[in-house]
Image (cartoon, grey):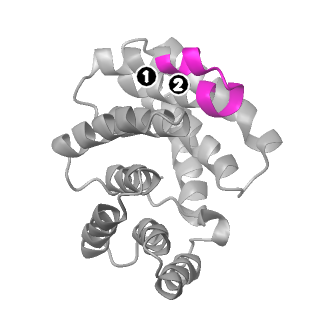
Amino acid sequence: LNQRTEDGLLKAVEFFERAVVEDAQYSLAYSGLADAHGLLAHYGVLGPADVWAKAASSAASAVMLDGLSAEAHTSLAHVHATQDWDWPGAEREFGRALELDPDSTEGRWRYGVFLWARGRYQEALVQVRKSLALDPFSLDANWILGWVLNSLRQADEAEEVAGRMLAMDPNVWLGYHVRGVARLLKGDEAAGLGDFERTADIEGGPAMHS
């Protein structure tokens, strides 16, 4: 799931579905299914009509099976935000998730994504930095930090974040994406476009990421 590639997401669905077959009461498997299906639509691998109902039902099942699971509430928050455009509902679920587990690194950065999408960049920055304080090596959290910094036109720091990501994994398309945007913001069009080309060339990383 965390590879954020077409092959990775499809394999994630396969494994989460196997987990549900093994244990139909396993909340985290349903949460994972919700996230994988949602990302397949978000990245354009499958159409919304093919996966959104599955994402919504899986997230609802996760919360129903374990109402004290921060992961389940985070998945439901994502469904509310990306499918329903229910901003209050999404924020309520993120709040519940972080109430249940204040040290949830994923809950923090995913809440940061929500805040970023709502144009609340400074609040997003706070959440993502909290996530990275808990797990400095999270590629997802670093990626979102880069997004937020680029949105705030803090391109130098965003490029530094991208450098850290690529030092951890030189083949992660997320790092090239952040660096490409930062370089364009700094006026280095050739280098920025080169990073976007590298993003698209990475195996399993289709051009949907640009």
Q: Report whether 148 appears left or right of 103.
A: right
Residue pictured at 39% horizontal, 68% vertical: 175
Q: Which residue is mark 2?
A: 77
Closer-to-camera residue (120/32):
120
19 over 174 or under it: above or below: above
198 over 46 or under it: above or below: below
Q: Which residue is mark 1?
A: 94
**Most extreme residue toward the right, as rendered?**
49
94 over 21 or under it: above or below: above
The answer to whether the residues at label 1 and label 2 have Cβ atoms under 8 Å apart is yes
Residue pictured at 30% horizontal, 15% vertical: 99
**How many angstroms separate mark 1 from mark 2 (CA)?**
6 Å
Q: Quadrant of the C terminus?
A: bottom right
Q: Residues within 10 Å of mark 2 (few under 14, many from 20)?
A: many
Query: Could you tell me residue 34's position as x and y percent?
Result: 58, 35
Q: Secondary structure at mark 2?
A: helix
The amino acid pointed to by label 2 is: Ala
Mark closer to the chain start, 1 or 2: 2
Residue pictured at 64% horizontal, 20% vertical: 86
Query: Could you tell me residue 27's position as x and y percent?
Result: 46, 25
Q: Can residue 26 be seen?
A: no
Q: Main secondary structure of the magenta part?
A: helix
Q: Is residue 139 magenta?
A: no
Q: Secondary structure at mark 1?
A: helix
User: In the rendered structure, which segment of residues is drawn in magenta?
Assistant: 80-91
